[in-house]
Image (cartoon, rainbow, N blue to C red):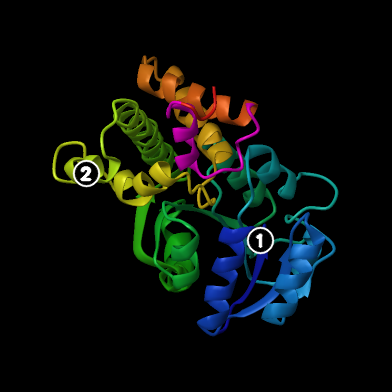
Amino acid sequence: MPEKIAFVGVGRMGANMARRLKDCGYTITAIYDPNRAAAAALAKELGARRAATLAAVTAAAEVIFTVVPDDAAQLAVFAANGDSLLVRAGGKYFINCATLTPGIHLEVERRAKRAGAFTLEGCMASSIPQARNGTLYLMCGGPRKTFERVKPILERLSSALRYIGPTGRAAQVKALVNLVMNINTAGLAEGLGLGAALGLDLDMLREVFAQTGASSQVLKTDGEDMQNRAHDCFFSAAHAAKDSTIAWTLGAQAGLQLPLSVATKQQFDRMVALGLGGLDKSGVAELTFKGRHA
């Protein structure tokens, strides 16, 4: 494979994406993460180098994936001054996969253009196993020419690759995906929590939900976990809180009242406040089942 690829941000999603591309024959040249131990371990596993600086990442690769936690982290790795991915970045391609405020993608694009580099949103609507198996649902935003240039790489990561439109549009769509998903998650937790309080058999209740209008993808992925208090993290409550805030902000900017979004955001914010932000989003059931958290 001609492209040398690097990763900035190697939590479970980023690390699995790097593993997948390595399996597909790509050369992973550099790994960077504030968690130096995690970066070093993955670099050793993939035969890459743990980069000590962001500038070293850019120097080592033609295509750089960023999978960072939030807006501030994204702006930091594309800093206008000091150590930055933009140091000598002319001709490099950056694929930014974090769930961010749409305006952040636009700002990163502006900074990259000044450096002669190219950016693309690669918004993910899947979870950790899909990142490892190359079956992510990827929504891309940016110049169409940039998308076509890196499409062969993205096709190795995604079984459902979709070009959304100009920069910022993919982030908007991702925010709406997570808006609906998080509302469904909080609603399912309330339905099962009330069912438990009424003394209903929850196996039966989930089966009925699955055959009626109460069915949802969240029911398939989270229903049994809510019932059994199995909240191993695939998509954290802290991320749900962040993403609900992004969607709520977009609604406010559009002049819309989104009461369900507000209520859902408050639930996930409460999880974070209670120290439960590291649980999977299914952990919102801990707030609704009687006898669990107050």
Find numbered disc 2 in the image and state the secondary structure of the residue it sits on: helix
Distance of label 2 from label 1 (alpha carbons): 40 Å
Q: Which residue: 53% across, 32% down?
A: 241
User: Label 1 neighbourhood size at 10 Å, few (<14), some (14-19), many (20+)?
Assistant: many
Question: Are the residues flagged by discs 2 and 1 in contact, CB closer than 8 Å?
Answer: no
Instruction: Name the quadrant of the N terminus.
Output: bottom right
Asked whether residue 154 is in view, the answer is yes
Identify the residue at horizontal 81%, vertical 61% (top origin).
36
247 left or right, relative to 181 = right
Q: Which residues are magenta?
A: 274-290
Q: Which residue is mark 1?
A: 10
Q: From what the image shows, is residue 223 above or below residue 8?
A: above
User: x, y (%) of residue 199?
Assistant: 29, 30
Amino acid at the residue labelled 2: Met
- The residue tagged with tag 1: helix, strand or loop? loop
Any mark on residue 152, and which?
A: none
Q: Residue furthest left?
A: 212
Residue located 54% across and 38% down the image: 237
Q: Which residue is mark 2?
A: 204
Q: Which tag is nearer the camera, tag 2 or tag 1?
A: 2
User: Crowdedness of circle 2 by 10 Å Cα count: few (<14), some, many (20+)?
Assistant: few
